[in-house]
Amino acid sequence: MTDAPDLTGLLGLQRPSGAFPSTVADRETSAEDETCFVTASVALLLGGAVDGGSARARSARERALNFVECCEVAEAPGAFAFYPRGGSTPRIVERLPADADDTSVAWLALLAAGRRTVGDARRAFVARIGPSARLLVPGDAPPWVRRGAVRTWLVERGRDNPVDLVVNANVAALAARIGETSHAACVGACATLLAAAAGDYDPTAFARLLAPFYASISELEPAVNRAHALGASTLGPCRKWIAKAGRGDDPFDDDQPLYCNQHGSPVWRAPALQRARRLAERGGPWTTEAPIPGRTR
């Protein structure tokens, strides 16, 4: 198989560490870093090219997953953090705890490549993500948050640990993939997403509350689509609701904002991830996320 130029360009962005990089910027400075989330997300999408016979894509995916596995937290096996352990790769902060987002996407990528088993993932889901499901919903929580919704950081206590709908969609995707849709964390994640859709909260106007760790509310779309495609079938009503946020003429532009801290700055962008998504949108072996009904791509 001869790789198409767009696939060749994507693979050319991979770093010696195996990571696919992102850029992070505030109003005054910018830098490059290498994160679990972006690298696992690209590795997951590379599966289509691997299945299509690309040896270069297979090698790139294996190196990417080597990087992802370095992000597993030693003291909490099965949980993954934003950056790998140690300080040998670019990063802007140190000692971030494991989080539900990186953990969910990392497991999806590892499972897709056959690196780990469903049994391994189930044990990790119960031990690492499950305890972050809210047993009680505090009075100051947004009105769509339901019991069982998963907090972002996988820590027992602490401030600045809100419920993010994109994170919860990724949790639901992993739960569906491993047959844990009846787990309280998945039930709570889906109920929270459905409550936001049923309340018809404008995705753009409420973006900072709906997804405080994402710089663009449009990130809900691929996350919910993937969860639904993997078996979180109750999320169907969310798909039309999030279409209101829109993605513009070029839904996965290289400059599309990706995520941020919960206060909105700095902002990460990941051209490698957006390019992988564009390849997936073209159909064929790259297709991993079903389109929203009635939506013209």
Image: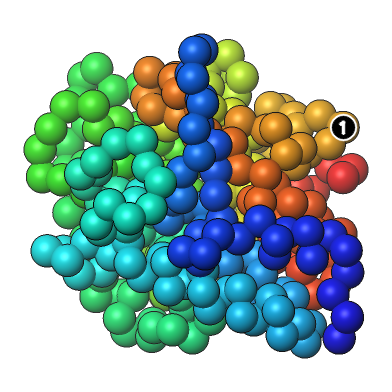
Give the residue at x 58% y 74%.
61
Determine whether 243 is above or below 102 in the image. Answer: above
- Name the spot of residue 35 as percent of width and height, x first: 44, 51
The quadrant in which the C terminus is found is top right
Q: In screen coordinates, is 20 left or right of 90?
A: right
Residue sitting at 61 percent across and 43 percent down? 270
Residue 232: image x %, image y %?
52, 60
Q: Residue 116: x and y, percent?
A: 39, 83
Q: Can residue 101 be seen in this view?
A: no
Q: Which of 160 and 67 is in front in this view?
A: 67
Residue sitting at x 51%, y 60%? 19
Residue 257 placed where, x, y %? 61, 31
Q: Element at badge 1?
A: loop
Is residue 89 in view from this perspective?
yes
Location of residue 247 by image quarter: top right
- Quarter of the image containing the N terminus? bottom right
Judge whether 289 appears above or below 224 on screen.
below
Q: In this view, does 80 lie above or below 141?
A: below
147 horizontally vs 289: left or right: left
Q: How many marks?
A: 1
Side of 97 where 272 appears, left or right: right
Nearer to the camera, 84 or 256: 84
How is the model colour-coded?
rainbow
- Nearer the observer, 212 or 31: 31
Q: Is residue 253 above or below residue 17?
A: above
Residue carrying label 1:
249
Q: In this view, does 63 lie to the left or right of 243?
A: left
- Give the crowd class for mark 1: few <14, some 14-19, many >=20 residues within 10 Å: few
Please state which amino acid type lies under the numbered disc 1: Asp
Going 42% across and 66% down the picture, which residue do you hit?
Answer: 67
